[in-house]
Image: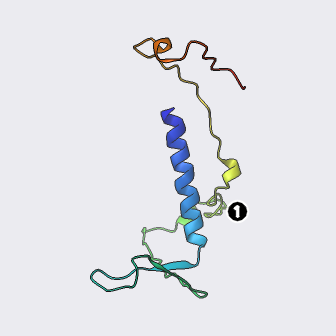
Amino acid sequence: MKKRIFLSGMMLSVFTMATASESNVVTNQPKLGEATDNNAPELVLHEELSRLEVEEEIDLGFDPYLYLPEDFNPYEGMVLPVKDIVVYDVEEDVELDFDTTVYLPEDFNPYKGM
């Protein structure tokens, strides 16, 4: 059960990050102490929202391309499709320290309706 919750959380965070990175909606929240008509954030659509990426050059002291294969692609496999995520359902036996029949109705059938 813990593994299932962990995997579900990981899938949710990956999906949320992927959705957020593709989104072009920005929230303009009021600054602290700023008076507003209501406390709800205002959504503003930006058509040309840009992102600044800083690429730093790192000097390794040697040419790493001499040690890589000719068809090497450093960006291969960077995108993880959701369909490729495999979730394993592991059944875990739960052992309770009390008799549950005391708390259930006499005619209780857990398989009724299945």
SS at circle 1: loop
The residue that label 1 is drawn on is 71
Residue 50, horizontal then vertical, whole percent: 54, 84
Please, what is the three-letter code of the amino acid marked with disc 1?
A: Asp
Which residue appears at 54% of the width and 16% of the height? 105
Classify 95 as above or below 17.
above
Q: Indicate the quadrant where residue 29 lies.
A: bottom left
Give the residue furthest to the left. Answer: 33
| Residue drawn at the location 39% of the way across and 77% of the way down | 39
Please say if 16 is above or below 11. Answer: below
Q: Report if residue 104 is visible in the image.
A: yes
* Residue 113, quarter of picture: top right
Viewer-closest of 111 and 43: 111
Residue 54 in the figure: left or right of residue 30: right
Residue 55's x, y, as percent?
Answer: 47, 77
Q: Residue at x 67, y 20 (%)?
A: 111
Residue at 59% across / 88% down in the picture?
A: 48
Mark 1 Cα-neighbour bin, 10 Å: few <14, some 14–19, many ≥20: few
Please say if 55 is above or below 10: below
Q: Splitting the image into 4 quarters, where does residue 67 fall? A: bottom right
The quadrant of the rendering that contains the C terminus is top right
Image-based side of 7 in relation to 111, left or right: left
Q: Is residue 80 above or below residue 94?
A: below
Label tally:
1
Relative depth, front residue between 20 and 86: 20
> Who is closer to the viewer here, 56 or 28?
28
Counting from the top left corner in percent of width and height, residue 27 is at 48, 78
User: Colour mode?
Assistant: rainbow
Q: Is residue 31 left or right of residue 7?
A: left
